[in-house]
Image (cartoon, rainbow, N blue to C red):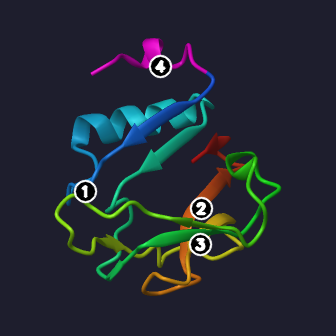
Amino acid sequence: MPSLDDLTAYDLSIWTAGDHDEALGDEAGDLLFSLMFEGVPVILSGAYVSDSGTEAVQRDIEVNDASHPLARGFEAGGIIEFVTPPSGNDYEIALLEDFTEEDGDFVFVRGPSSEASGEPSVVTLEDEFGAFRL
């Protein structure tokens, strides 16, 4: 695992947890929070990055905020279809139930072909107190 000093040398850190039920272990979680408190923006992705107990099949995403840098090049309302998983089976991903638009920006939401269509899929959060962005 890289050191905090190594990671603070970058303008952005991208963490992906894949489809593991435990998105981060203790060591990685501690490093992630230390990095955020250093002010380095973090992108965290994975099927289980929230504490939600609710899962739903996701087949696509819809651009909700085309003005956000993460959506650059996409038009508002645009639909991005997911590639069919190699297994051919639908893939369930935990819902991001703990967030409201007051908490952050819903850059992408679950698309019309997904279960729980319209629910957030990519959320950006910025904590003014801790000066971290996720």
- The residue singled out by tag 1 in the image is 19
Can you give x and y, in whole percent of width and height, for residue 106 in the image? Answer: 66, 67
Q: Nearer the viewer, mark 1 or mark 2?
A: 1
Residue matched to label 4: 7
In the picture, residue 88 is in which quadrant? bottom left
Measure how far apart labels 1 and 2 are at the Cα level: 18 Å
**Residue range highlighted in magenta:** 1-10
- The location of residue 48, given as percent across then percent down, is 31, 62
Of 110 and 127, the residue lying toward us: 110
Q: Amino acid at mark 4?
A: Leu
> Does residue 27 belong to the magenta stretch?
no
How would you classify the magenta stretch by its main secondary structure?
Answer: loop
Secondary structure type for disc 1 = loop
**Helix, strand or loop under label 4:** helix
- Element on which disc 3 rests: strand
Which residue has dot 3 on it? 109
Q: Tell me which numbered mark, 4 or 2, is placed earlier along the sequence.
A: 4
- Residue 132 appears left or right of 83: right
Q: Secondary structure at mark 2?
A: strand
Q: Nearer the viewer, residue 101 or 116?
A: 116
Mark 2 or 3, nearer chain start: 3
Q: Amino acid at mark 2?
A: Val
Whole-Å distance between the Cαs marked 3 and 4?
Answer: 29 Å
User: Mark 3: which amino acid?
Assistant: Val
Q: Is residue 12 above or below residue 48?
A: above
Residue, x 76% and y 64% (percent of image)?
65
Labels 1 and 4: the sequence-earlier one: 4
**Which residue shows up at 41% across the image and 76% down it?**
95
Determine which of the numbered discs, if any, sits on residue 123 in the image: 2
Question: Which numbered disc, 3 or 4, marks the residue that appears first in the sequence?
Answer: 4
Q: Find residue 69 and report its horizontal and vertical position in percent.
A: 75, 45
Q: Amino acid at mark 1?
A: Asp
